[in-house]
Image (cartoon, coloured by chain):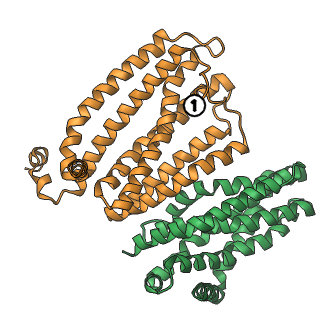
Chain colours: A orange, B green
Amino acid sequence: MSNRLINWFRYASPQSFYPLAGKLIPWFWALAALFGLTGLYIAFFVAPTDFQQGEGYRIIFIHVPAAWMSMFIYLVMAFWAGLGLALNTRLSGMMAQALAPTGALMAFLSLWTGAFWGKPMWGTWWVWDARLTSALILFFLYIGFIALQAAIDDARRADRAGAILALVGVVNVPIIYFSVKWWNTLHQGASVSLTKAPTMAATMLWGMLIMALAFWMYSIAVALMRVRAIILEREAHTEWVKALPEVRGSTS
Amino acid sequence: MNAVLAVIRRDLLLAMRRKSEVFTALFFFVIVTSLFPLGLGPEPALLKKIAPGVIWVAALLATMLGLSRLFAPDHADGTLEQLALSPAPLGLLITGKIAAHWITTGLPLVLMAPVLGLQYDLDAGALGVMVAALLLGTPLLSLIGAIGAALTLGVRGGGVLISLLVLPLYVPALIFGAGAVEAHLSGLGAAGHLSLLAALLALAVFFAPWATTAALRIALE
């Protein structure tokens, strides 16, 4: 048992995580490409045309995974932030910082593709509907987190201040979601749910799930690349970073 | 409890010595709400419809104005460190500071709001609901705002940053606060909205001083 614990904590140090992340990144990129190509093939060639929405519905293969990821990444980010606050590990704060831009990108993508979908379906680019509004506010929360971290020069203080903001945000996200929901609802109800049979064709569902996996792999790969860059930046003064071949090559 | 009262008394005394700050926020609130009819036209039906939203948005912005001054002067002259070192729990003292902030910025807004509501042709019932909603909502704004103020303490461009952090978190207060008046005007009754506001306030009273204290300790390191 103690042996396993030590193994886990070994990778909590930036020095041992850096090479591990380097080894994992190509795998996640490969999986992202594999799932992405499969998902897009299903999306464009296999999935049938929707009898109501025509070809335009195919944007959900990007829209829904992006929306899922935007919410999920916020949770993961808050998890790392909370862990960093509780255990005072350096890597956790770096992970939270690395995830934030990807999460913001996903939130933005879901809003943008949603606008493209809304124009032909609802006849308008934007409606003040509950889900759209809470996605927009989630985007603002990401921007606030990134701005706060960028404004604080001391990296450790930035991590901990960001962690508190992320945790406050996580408490607030459901409150915001329900308050906006009671405020106004026009968005179509969730088509995919765990409790009842989905109301969409099986191939569409599969395409969407595979695209979600692709987004997932992409997010992990990008976050790991970013965390490696953050490690290099923050640990630039240490001997092990100076001894890295890629660092020696660029400075000499 | 004595320590809390002492902190409230001290902050109120300081506010009374520098009255201009209190009045700046209050007049900001009055001016912003008076600008909307000039921009939108003087039709009573339209004004009546937008009144709750306008007054609430103006209240959010007016509360924001004072937030960056909530901890900054105490941080600059070392009072905050003395509070952190005192035997009374910092969380309680911070609650006192937040209460004082509400009394100097939130309470004047609540008292001024009915007068502004009259400009927007709201009747007595709607005015009463609006005051009740503001009475529950403005402490919520002070409590949530304190977290943002603590996080941005001593940070570059803190004043602008604080609005970016705090305004998204103000959304539920805005929705239920303005919604209460609209529900009353449309004949649905405002009890549900007011209960939700009170529930949010209870949550915030419990959690916000705690998060604020954690953020202040980070800033004091």
Query: Is B218 on the left or on the right of A140, as rendered?
Result: left
Which image quarter is the N terminus of chain B in? bottom right
Query: Is A20 on the left or on the right of A43, as rendered?
Result: left
Q: Position of residue A59 (x, y in %)?
A: 53, 23
Q: Position of residue A78 (x, y in %)?
A: 44, 51
Say what secondary structure mark 1 lies in. helix
Residue at 90% x, 53% y is: B44
Q: Position of residue A222 (x, y in %)?
A: 33, 38
Crowdedness of circle 1 by 10 Å Cα count: few (<14), some, many (20+)?
many
Q: Position of residue A155 (x, y in %)?
A: 32, 61
Query: Is A192 on the left or on the right of A249, as rendered?
Result: right
B191 and A45: which is toward the camera: B191
Q: Is residue A163 above or below residue B2?
A: above
Tag 1 residue: A114
Residue A243 appears in the figure: yes
As drawn, the residue found furthest toward the front would be A1
Which image quarter is the C terminus of chain B in? bottom left
Residue at 29% x, 41% y is: A224
Q: Is residue A61 above or below residue B58?
A: above
Three-letter code for the amino acid on which mark 1 is drawn: Gly
- Quarter holding residue B163: bottom right
- Quarter holding residue A49: top right
Q: Is residue A41 above or below residue B9?
A: above
Residue B61 appears in the figure: no
Residue at 62% x, 84% y is: B8
